Amino acid sequence: MISPLSIDSRRMRLTKGTERKIGRKAGGLHDFFEPVTRCEVTLKGRIRISVPSEQKVVSNESSYQLEAAIHEAFDAAGRCLGDA
């Protein structure tokens, strides 16, 4: 898991399972870029990832299903970090 990890669910109530899934997905970003120093997840399809040299913002609002949106957003974040 990335520390610190910030999850802002706005007006949604998240289950513990969803929070754990986000934590696992955030931790997986280390496979694409090391070190990720901070990850902020806003559940409106946006992930902000901080790495030592820069900050990247990934937006993904293509899915209405929460689980699919989380998966798609972290896939996009991985591609973004892989291009760094």
Image: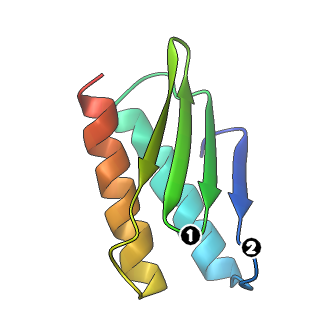
Residue 63 position (above or below residue 52): below
Which quadrant of the figure contains the C terminus?
A: top left
**Going by the image, does 10 lie left or right of 40?**
right
Classify residue 38 as left or right of residue 74: right
Which of 84 and 61 lies nearest the eye of the viewer?
Answer: 61
Q: Nearer the viewer, residue 33 or 72?
A: 72
Residue 64's disc number: none
Picture residue at 49% right of the left edge, 65% below the top: 45
Relative vertical location of residue 57 with respect to residue 51 in this rendering, above or below:
below
Q: What residue is shown with label 1?
A: 44
Label 1 vs 2, first from the N-terminus: 2
- Give the residue type at disc 1: Lys
10 Å crowding of disc 1: few (<14), some (14-19), many (20+) = some
- Count of numbered marks: 2
Residue appearing at x 43%, y 22% in the figure: 34
Question: Percent from the top left, x then y, of residue 21?
Answer: 53, 69
Cα–Cα gap, marks 1 and 2: 8 Å
The residue wearing badge 2 is 10
Relative to 28, say whether 70 is above or below. below
Q: Position of residue 66 (x, y in %)?
A: 48, 83
Q: Position of residue 53 (x, y in %)?
A: 51, 11
Within 10 angstroms of label 2, few (less than 14), some, or many (20 or more) residues?
few
Q: Are marks 1 and 2 in contact (CB under 8 Å)?
A: yes
- Give the secondary structure at mark 1: loop
Q: Quadrant of residue 29?
A: top left
Residue type at tag 2: Arg
* Point 59% across, 46% down: residue: 1
Q: Secondary structure at mark 2?
A: loop
